[in-house]
Image (tube, rainbow, N blue to C red):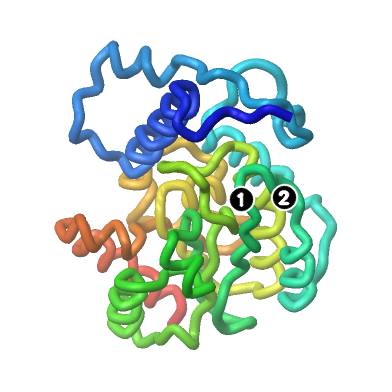
C-alpha cells in the first residue's frame, strides 16, 4: 500500500495545520488571526490511505482532533475492558489500533501509584518520555517535582499518564485516529485507579477528557466533571519552561487541587 512521503507537500501541510491547532488549544494568539489563516486551517489536507480507524471517523476531511476526542470521550464509559492496571498494561502492549502512525513504538501507559488520589494526564509522550519510558520526563519532570512539593506531594504519590500513548511521528498534535484509539484505554486507567482528583496538563488532555474545544486558558482555574471525578485543567510543565509568566496561574490551579485533596 502506498503512503504519503514524510516530506511531501501534503504531509507538510497536514503537519503545519496540526501544529497551529495545538497552539490554538493553548489559547495562544501571538500570530494574527487573519482571514487568510482561517482559510488555511479550513483547507482539507490530501486524504491519507484508508485504514480501519480512518473509515470509522467518516467520509470527507478529517475532523479537528478535539471534535473526534469529544465523541470518543462520550462513548468511553460504555467500552468494556480490564479493571486492573496490570491487565490494562498487558492489553496496551498488544495495541494495534494505529500501528502505521506510531512507527513501531510500544505504547507508553504511565507510571506511579496504582491507587493515587491524584492522576496527572498529559497530552502525548515526547522524545524524552519515550527514552525514559515515563511521561513528564527530563526538565519537565524536574519542574513537576517542584510543583508537587509545593502542595505536599511527591512523584510516588501520583500517577502520570497521557491521552495518546505513543509519540506522534510528525510535529504538532496527534491525529484524530490516535486520539480516538487511545481514549478508551485512558478511561480504563482512570476507572482502575479511581482517583480523588484528575489534573489535565495540556490543551489536548483537557479538551479530550471534557469533550470540549474551549482553549485551555479558559478552561483552567476551576474544576470540571469527568465521570463524577473533579478535573482541573492546567498547563504542562514543559510549556511552563518556555512560558514562565503562566506559572502564577498554574500555582492557583495547584492550590485548588490541594484544597480538594484535603477536603
Taking the spot 38% from the left edge, 31% from the top edge, the residue there is 16
Q: Which residue matches tag 2?
A: 76
From the image, tell me which residue sits under label 1. 103
The percent coordinates of residue 144 (x first, y second) are 34, 74
Q: Is residue 237 visible?
A: yes
Left or right, 205 with respect to 145, comes to right
Above or below: residue 158 compared with residue 44:
below
- Residue 261's label in the rendered image is none
196 to the left or right of 99: left
Residue 263 place in picture, x, y as percent: 46, 79
- The residues bearing labels 1 and 2 have C-alpha atoms spaced at a distance of 26 Å
Q: Nearer the viewer, mark 1 or mark 2?
A: 1
Q: Residues within 10 Å of mark 2 (few under 14, many from 20)?
A: some
Numbered-mark total? 2
Q: Quadrant of residue 26?
A: top left
Q: Is residue 255 in view?
A: no
As helix, strand or loop, the secondary structure at mark 2 comes to: helix
Instruction: Name the spot of residue 171 as percent of width and height, x first.
Output: 42, 42
Whether residue 51 sits left or right of residue 210 in the image: it is right
Residue 215 lies in quadrant: top left
Amino acid at each position: 500500500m502506498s503512503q504519503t512521503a514524510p516530506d511531501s507537500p501534503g504531509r507538510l501541510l497536514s503537519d503545519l495545520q496540526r501544529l497551529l491547532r495545538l497552539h490554538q488549544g493553548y489559547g495562544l494568539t501571538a500570530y494574527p488571526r487573519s482571514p487568510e489563516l482561517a482559510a488555511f486551517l479550513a483547507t482539507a489536507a490530501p486524504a491519507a490511505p484508508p485504514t480501519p480507524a480512518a473509515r470509522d471517523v467518516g467520509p470527507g476531511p478529517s475532523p479537528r482532533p478535539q471534535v473526534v476526542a469529544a465523541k470518543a470521550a462520550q462513548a468511553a464509559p460504555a467500552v468494556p475492558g480490564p479493571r486492573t492496571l496490570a491487565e490494562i498494561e498487558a492489553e496496551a502492549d498488544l495495541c494495534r489500533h494505529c500501528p502505521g502512525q506510531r512507527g513501531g513504538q510500544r505504547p507508553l501507559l504511565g507510571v506511579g501509584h496504582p491507587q493515587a488520589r491524584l492522576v496527572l494526564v498529559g497530552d502525548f509522550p515526547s522524545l524524552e518520555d519515550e527514552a525514559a519510558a515515563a511521561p513528564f520526563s527530563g526538565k519537565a519532570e524536574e519542574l513537576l517535582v517542584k510543583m508537587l512539593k509545593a502542595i505536599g506531594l511527591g512523584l510516588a504519590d501520583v500517577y502520570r499518564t497521557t491521552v495518546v500513548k505513543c509519540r506522534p511521528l510528525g510535529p504538532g498534535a496527534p491525529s484524530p485516529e490516535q486520539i480516538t484509539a487511545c481514549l478508551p484505554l485512558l478511561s480504563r486507567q482512570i476507572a482502575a485507579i479511581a482517583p480523588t482528583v484528575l489534573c489535565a496538563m495540556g490543551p489536548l488532555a483537557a479538551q479530550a477528557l471534557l469533550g470540549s474545544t474551549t482553549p485551555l486558558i479558559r478552561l483552567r482555574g476551576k474544576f470540571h466533571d469527568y465521570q463524577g471525578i473533579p478535573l482541573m485543567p492546567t498547563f504542562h510543565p514543559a510549556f511552563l519552561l518556555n512560558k514562565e509568566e503562566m506559572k502564577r496561574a498554574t500555582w492557583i490551579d495547584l492550590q485548588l487541587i490541594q484544597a480538594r485533596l484535603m477536603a
